[in-house]
Image (cartoon, grey):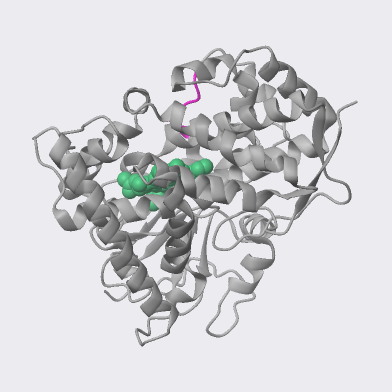
Amino acid sequence: MAKLTPKDLPNIPVAPGAWPIIGHLPSMMKNQFSFLLKQEEDLGPLFWVHSGFGQWSVVVTGKPAHKVMKNKETRSDVMGEDDPVTGYITANTVSIHDGAPHRRIRGSMQAPFTPKGMTAAKIGEVLQQLAEQHISRWKDKQELTILNETSEFALDIIFRMLGVENLDLPQWRKKYNQFIGPFTIIPIDLPGTPRRKSIKSVEWMDKQFAKMIERVRETGDKDTMLGAIVHGTDEDGQGLTEEELYANLRILGLAGHETTAATVAWMFIHLARDKQLWSEIRDEVMAQEAPPTSPKEMALFPKVEALFREVLRLYPVLCLLTPRRVEEPFEVHGVTLPKDTIVAANLLSLSRDPEEYPSPETLDISRWTERERSPRPSEAVQFGGGPHFCLGYHLAVFEGVVYTVVATRYLAQAGLRLSHKGDFPTPSYMPLTRPPSKLQLQFERDE
Ligand code: HEM
């Protein structure tokens, strides 16, 4: 498909400062927040950005960005199976389809991701056990490299939910990191190259999945997460093909790992820097006898859940939604974008919209605790919107709450808290917004 560039649509301004070949990547890597805010201020709500290697997209800012996520005119196939960089990972997955095929794939997978399905699959117990196992290792540590801690947990929990045994987790982690390692995007498949290692890891994971799938087929298990996906069907009784089953099992780690890990790490950074916030969260956690065992019981921890939502609002993991391709003329901000324009919704602008969130740069958990209603979909925009809204939304919130409750209990029982001195850490931005990977938090006595 011939994607459009600014030459095809000269009426839309181009963000200044693009380098040859790498485009705006350096500016976005340095500070994607200020880059996007500045373009909006100087150029208005629509502007062209070059994300490197010829990838031009029109960024849509402000409330009309919601329309990019929910419309009949755009398609999600930009990083589809023909893409030499990601195609071998995205082929057959839920993310690159639209319309009937998307409804079938998503419909077949969704049961274990609903609060009811998570309760049936006893996800709460698995989460609590694994969180306790991970956090008990803190006793041997002088300080915590917080993103390492949360990343390892977020990846392990996906494998555990799919039925991987505890002892096999280190091997799965190793293979998974080879699967998605940063240099795998170089599409050279020769012995020893990162791409070849990635393909070998896919073969390894698929072999393990095959054994696990055979087991749930034999037992007829429909309750565990794996069982529910393997036996899942849409409303018309249609399920996943074998290729779709394996591809979507593999992609769960990618979609649900760094995203949740970054968010939970921000929670601990704020808890380490703000004693008042720590006392409020600690008191709420210690007022209950145990961590929540089901999504319903999260209601007992409103401040912990609010902290999850508030850090995600401040640091949306994806500042720009995965781009969409215009299939039929698409009108936004009064401009009609023609077929094959690539559009990206600016989630950062929605997440820090001052009309919705007064003093949007301030962390304030009372934005969530003082409401008498559940958050609306538009208030969970960091998870996208429309038909591709994050499948793991309920799971991610539950995971963040259980991990934080277990960690807070551990610290409070030991008379400790976490602390971080010095300047507030600057996020890293590409490809996801996350805290610095080497950032360390210290343990101190909780006075
Ligand atoms: C804080 C944590 C998370 C954030 C911020 C997040 C964010 C997102 C976003 C923005 C999308 C929409 C992409 C689009 O429209 O193109 C998405 C889709 C998706 N997410 Fe998440 N996610 C999180 C956690 C998870 C978890 C834990 C899982 C599962 C293990 C998961 C699985 C998925 C899947 C399968 C999709 C594709 C849905 C579809 O295309 O229909 N995510 N996520």
Is residue 140 placed above or below 44 in the rendered structure? above
Looking at the image, which residue sits at the far bottom? 190
> Would you say 158 lies left or right of 45 here?
left
Residue 413 visible here: yes
Q: Quadrant of residue 19?
A: bottom right
Quarter containing the C terminus: top right
Is residue 194 placed above or below 281 in the rendered structure? below
Q: Quadrant of residue 274?
A: top right
> Would you say 206 lies left or right of 373 here?
left
x, y (%) of residue 142?
A: 80, 48
Looking at the image, which residue sits at the far front? 167
Is residue 412 placed above or below 15 in the rendered structure? above
Residue drawn at (54%, 45%) of the image: 153
> Would you say 136 lies left or right of 173 here?
right
x, y (%) of residue 224?
A: 29, 33
Q: Nearer the viewer, residue 255 or 102?
A: 255
Quarter containing the N terminus: bottom left
Q: Nearer the viewer, residue 308 or 146?
A: 146
x, y (%) of residue 359?
A: 73, 34
Q: Nearer the viewer, residue 198 or 91?
A: 198
- Magenta segment includes 421: no
Residue 333 visible here: no
Q: Quadrant of residue 221?
A: top left
Residue drawn at (33%, 55%) of the image: 250
Number of numbered labels in the structure image: 0
Part of the protein shown in magenta: 374-379
x, y (%) of residue 246?
A: 24, 55
